[in-house]
Amino acid sequence: MQTFQGLAVSDGLTVGPVVRIDRGAAGLHRIVCDPFRERALYEAAIVLAKDELNRLQQHACGQDADILMFQIALLEDESFTNEIGDYIAAGAGSAAAVERAEQIFAGRLKNVDDDYIRERSVDVCDACRRVVDILDGRPSRRLHLTEPSILAAELFYPSDLFGQAPGMILGLASETDSETSHAAIMARSMGIPAVFQLGKGVAAAAAGCRAVVDAEHAQLIIDPTAAQLRQVKARRQELQNSNALPDPLAAAPCRTRDGTPFVLLASAACAAPEAIQKAIQAGASGIGLLRTESVVIKELTEAQQVEAYKTCIKNSGGKPITVRTCDWAADDCGQWMDGMQTRMEEETTALTQLSALMQAAVEVPEGALQVLFPMIPDVDAWRTRMDQMKRCNESLKEKGLPFCGNLPVGCLIEIPAAALMAGEIIDAGADFLAVDLDDLVQYTCGVSRREKPTPADNPAVLRLVQDVMHAAQTRGVPLYLCGIMQKDLETMPAFMRIGVRNFCVESVHINTLKSILMQTEL
């Protein structure tokens, strides 16, 4: 029996056989031909890889479909293909050239401050590995489970989890995946127990063994004893019995032990509008952060974006929605993908999204749809966004289209510079503020997400949030916390004590946070 401690990213408890996702050793027995031949091999492999991705996409939906579309876009990207072509022309083999491009493009994404963009580094690796496997003549990596199993891996790629029948994946165990990885998000959406960051060598140690994924204690237990198995069985029965009953917390008023009211909002993605309805059913008072990066990846037209936002509004059941605009160009991520980044940097991308939001807002009562601008470092950047809003307003008037010209607009506070200038940003027109706690902790404390987690209630972070709260309160502007990780839920009472009353979390954490805050006495 071996026990490994990790990070619980999806609640639950399960037991079963472990199947290891082993990518094997690449690059064995390669023979490099002349550059013309290597270029032809690469182009043929790209065609085959895109065919595989297109077949997967036909059966995918929501975020899975967006991930596959991103991978297809990568393989078609001019800067990506040019990088590989130049290396082949210099004498490298086609497979080695793709591996080099994988390191370059994935490496540029891994340290980007935006969670969504950072996790796309795994998509780059996934797409490139698919091409390399074809070039090396290795069989398809698609997993075929013959019985319900726990999957273990050093790092999960999105395609590792696609296409599995319901019930075949009992749990996930990863050596390195993060709480914001696609595998973690998928595990939570499917209700699969998952424990990540278990450490090097765990997947190999667990392969072929019977194991327990215990998210309650953030543990992976390999070859559990008979006594442990009995305890797991009893605990699973308790969980099943409690899950069969309606959660009384969902209907309970949001008040602390001493009667102080608070508000719980949920985060969601435009790519998965069905999750909005689930969040409202879980007890959320609205959607505090709707991610919209998928509309840029898909390059939706203005009319298509309007319909996408209307679908999200419909699924909210009349509850308020705050839409975070897509602003990748503001992230200092360098030239990670020149061709795609050029499209994102075009101002028309921002104007199209804002115009679509203004048109979609006519579907809801005034103020029920809000716009949240990310990565605002100073007042000048905020004024640029306000100028874009004004231009959209004028353009829609000229076209005679129905729209809402006075959408509430807010600033996402992610960096200390914005926190220190919160008052001035409000004075420049911000109707509300949202503090991205995960990013603020990282930038304030100078830590990487791959290092040992820094508590969200770090004194420096608390002081910054308190300063932002003061700026908002003195100007009569609402504020809420978002970017709250599962590991940070227990620290939220500290933020209640400095005046925060509104919180935005993933829907699966709503009642957990509600329970914590209801037991808090200020």
Image (cartoon, rainbow, N blue to C red):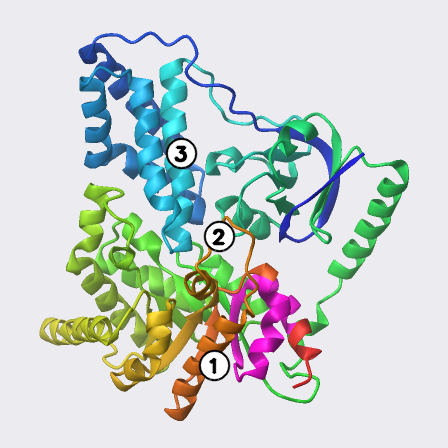
Q: Of the residues shown, which amino acid type is indicated by label 3?
A: Cys
501 horizontally vs 260: left or right: left
* Marks 1 and 3, the one that precedes in the sequence: 3
Could you give the CA–CA distance between mark 2 and mark 3, rounded to whole angstroms? Answer: 19 Å
Residue 286 x/y as whole percent: 49, 73
Residue 242 x/y as whole percent: 78, 61
Q: Nearer the viewer, residue 374 or 237?
A: 374
Residue 510 visible to an observer of this rendering: yes
Residue 371 visible to an observer of this rendering: no
What range is drawn magenta here? 488-514
Q: Are marks 1 and 3 in contact (CB under 8 Å)?
A: no
Magenta span main SS: helix
**Which residue, given by chain and number where applicable, does mark 3 sit on?**
125
Q: Quadrant of the C terminus?
A: bottom right
Q: Of the residues shown, which amino acid type is indicated by label 2?
A: Arg
Q: Of the residues shown, which amino acid type is indicated by label 1?
A: Gln
**Which residue, given by chain and number where applicable, does mark 1 sit on?**
466
> Is residue 504 in the magenta section?
yes
Q: Residue at x 34, y 52 (%)?
A: 294
Q: Are marks 1 and 2 in contact (CB under 8 Å)?
A: no
Q: Quadrant of residue 124?
A: top left
Count of residue discs: 3
Q: Residue at x 53, y 48 (%)?
A: 178
In the image as oriented, which residue stretches furthest toward the left?
398
Q: Quadrant of residue 87?
A: top left
* Marks 2 and 3, the one that precedes in the sequence: 3
Q: What element does badge 3 sit on?
A: helix
Residue 250, compared with residue 309, is above or below; it is below
Mark 1 or mark 3, whichever is nearer to me? 1
**Which residue, given by chain and number where applicable, does mark 2 sit on?**
449
* Marks 1 and 2, the one that precedes in the sequence: 2
Q: Residue at x 27, y 57 (%)?
A: 304
